[in-house]
Image (cartoon, rainbow, N blue to C red):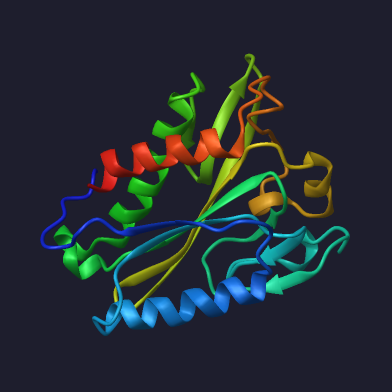
Amino acid sequence: MVSDVLTAPKPEWRVEPGLTPYPEAVAFMEARAAAIADGRAAELVWLVEHPPIYTAGTSAKDEDLIEARFPVFKTGRGGQFTYHGPGQRVGYVMLDLKRRKGADVRGFVRDLEEWLIRTLARFNVKGERREGRVGIWVARGKTREDKIAAIGVRVRKWVTFHGVSLNVDPDLSHFTGIVPCGVREHGVTSLHDLGLLVSMADVDVAMKDAFDEVFG
């Protein structure tokens, strides 16, 4: 599914410089989502990077926190444990689903997946969905596949917040403190790990173009 916009103008697009502390990001999203729901603010796609942290979604299991190497934040998004840190592009997506055909949360998540897949395709990377595993995956030969992007969302009053994370060039060893998204059988990768030495600015351009294609 690609979103069919009814009356919504294009969302505001904002790229935050530097590293954004996670509590500040959550507070901002909470306030902005409430303002969008009340008609006091425009929809927003907010691209950030965070200092090294782990976040625990609503389905996180204690045993999946192997070593708390960095601060751990419980968050209201769906999903399990994930890592955020420098070199990873986090995209927080605040959209009013009531303005979009069907007010379909599952369709929205499908569109987030498509957004990431099309972003990766711009770098000739084949990102793929996997049944029963959230996020986007890259095949590494016949037997190995690694996760390159994660998805975790929350919806309140039909307004979305939280969103996606795409590994551009994070320190992949930082993921070893958790079981990422509860999946023990597979690893993680990044664009640089795949040999694509693209910049964060390159990725931002690709993300914006792909977002416009998927969400209108």
Q: How many marks?
A: 0
Most distant residue in the front direction: 17
Pick whichever, 186 or 29, lies toward us.
29
Would residue 116 be visible to someone looking at this image? no
Q: Is residue 143 left or right of residue 13?
A: right
Q: Is residue 181 above or below residue 208?
A: below
x and y, in percent, of residue 200 in the image: 59, 39
User: For this view, does 9 lie left or right of residue 68?
Assistant: left
| Horizontal and vertical percent position of residue 127 | 49, 29
Q: Give me the residue at 28% from left, 82% from top.
A: 40
- Taking depth in this image into account, of 149 and 11 the one nearest to the observer is 11
Which residue occupies 74% across, 60% down? 51
Q: Position of residue 8 (x, y in %)?
A: 18, 62
The residue shown at (76%, 68%) is: 62
Residue 205 point in image, percent of width and height: 44, 37
Vertically, is 124 above or below 207? above
Q: Identify the residue at horizontal 85%, vertical 58% (top origin).
A: 66
User: To which quarter of the image does residue 48 belong?
Assistant: bottom right
